[in-house]
Image (cartoon, helix red, strand yellow):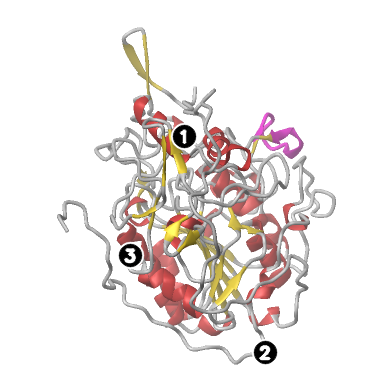
Amino acid sequence: MKRRVVVMGLVLAGLVVVAGGTVTYQFATQSNSNTAQPVGGIGKIKHVVIIMQENRSFDSYFGTYPGANGIPMKDGVPTVCVPDPRVQKCILPYPDHHDRNYGGPHDQLNALEDIAGGSLNGFIGQAELASRSGCVIADNPACGAGGGPTDVIGYHDGGDIPNYWAYARNYVLQDHMFQPNNSWSLPQHLFMVSEWSAACVVPGQPMSCTNAVQNPALTPDFAQGRLVRKHGSARRLAAAPPDYAWTDLTYLLHKHQVSWAYYIQKGTQPDCTDGGLTCAPRRQSAGTPGIWNPLPYFDTVKQDHQLGNIQGLSHFYASAKSGTLPAVSWIAPSNPNSEHPPALVSAGQRYVTRLINTIMQGPDWNSTAIFLSWDDWGGFYDHVKPPTVDQNGYGLRVPGLVISPYARKGYIDHQTLSHDAYVKFIEDAFLGGRRLNPKTDGRADPRPTVRESARQLGNLMADFNFNQSPRPPLILPENPSTTLITPGSLR
């Protein structure tokens, strides 16, 4: 049985306003409405690369970015305060320059408690309760990283993550990018490739699938091998491989002869099996299906004989350098580079920079759109209430960046977005606007919503100017100077 940690019956005050006023920004920004209409030129994009990192909220990375909807402040002091039930007072968001963070619990129930009906006041209480409850299983999203300080209210700035802020200054930052559902990494990665998270009763039968945003059929890497203790004895759980029978995006891509690849970095999974910083990590590669590599469990991928499209990251580097990137690419990291607490922020930034530099230096740069984001909030504070789309989300805000030779420069996109917008853009760029719609895609399933058609969802076309000449690459150092405090440092 999956462990859940949630503050139940804990009465907390709403966010406390400790000062009033407005923020003075360093430069003016442009904004968009949700009614922005597509413009011509999308045909110039021949390659979409989705780089999905792990477990950071928007405020934790861009909460002080000039012009963005970040942490409310006056004269550099936050005007919001988050209750700490342990000490019966509220805590102001604070700059946290530590390279290693711990975050907080981040399953569906934790998300609901963090959001607290719009008060956004549950983050510290959830993190503390997870710590007190003896959580030691790091692959349980209800536990967070475990064993570390409660740092969910801390945030990084441009000195800590200079390359991410440089991408924002030179390309597009999305300050209303919400995770597509209010849950943890497996549902997020299922949504990333299919816009749904479900559990299916009858193998191979899409109509037997039912909505399951918290507990879809678990991949064996999550369930198998976990110790269960009862009456003084312990046994290890076994898990049969899941059957994801509903329709994913690769079905449409294959049907219309659009190339795709899912690249996964060899190493260890962004969560580990036995817990904390000292756990024995579980191996990860293109040949090990799991939470961060779910496509092998989709019937469509097997039936279309597309398992070979799931490849190691070395294939990405080779394709990017030779100019043979597929039309659609997803890239998943290994644990050390994932930014999933307690992985180092600097290691993730270095890894992402190398990915982007490789694309920029390759022949495909002038026809590529890179979408960089983080899969869920990881328990970190964010001050914006997510809009309601259906029973699955949206979830809390995460950082979103668009990097392309046709991306607007220094543009802050204020549209309401989710990772569903990536699917919508891919469908518009390569599929003539066809959707993952059970009524039209030729493979019906009972999903509750056609997410690309949600009225709240903005359009990524607003982030591009296809009338401009393609801009040259911005090659950044993989190891920039930062203000991060390395583990064990006294500074």
Q: Residue at position x 70%, y 67% from top?
A: 459
Q: Is 200 included in the stretch rendered in magenta?
A: yes
**For mark 1, what is the residue?**
220
Q: Amino acid at mark 1?
A: Pro
Neighbours of disc 3 within 10 Å: few (<14), some (14-19), many (20+): many
Magenta stretch in the rendered image: 199-210
- The type of residue carrying mark 2 is Asn
Q: Is residue 150 left or right of residue 7?
A: left
Name the residue carrying label 3.
160
Single out the mark in the foreground, 2 or 1. 2
Give the number of the mark in front: 3 or 1. Answer: 3
Q: Earlier in the sequence, mark 3 or mark 1?
A: 3
Horizontally, residue 3 falls left or right of residue 201, namely left
Identify the residue position indicated by label 2 in the image.
467
Task: Measure how far apart labels 3 and 1 are at the Cα level.
Answer: 36 Å
Quadrant position of residue 318 = bottom left
CA distance separating discs 2 and 1: 48 Å
Q: Amino acid at mark 3?
A: Asp
**Residue 9 drawn above or below residue 273:** above
Residue 477 quadrant: bottom left
Dot 3 lies on which element?
loop
**Is residue 312 something that shows in the picture?**
no
Label whose residue precedes the other's in the sequence (2 or 3): 3
CA distance for labels 2 and 3: 34 Å
Percent of width and height locating residue 322: 45, 80
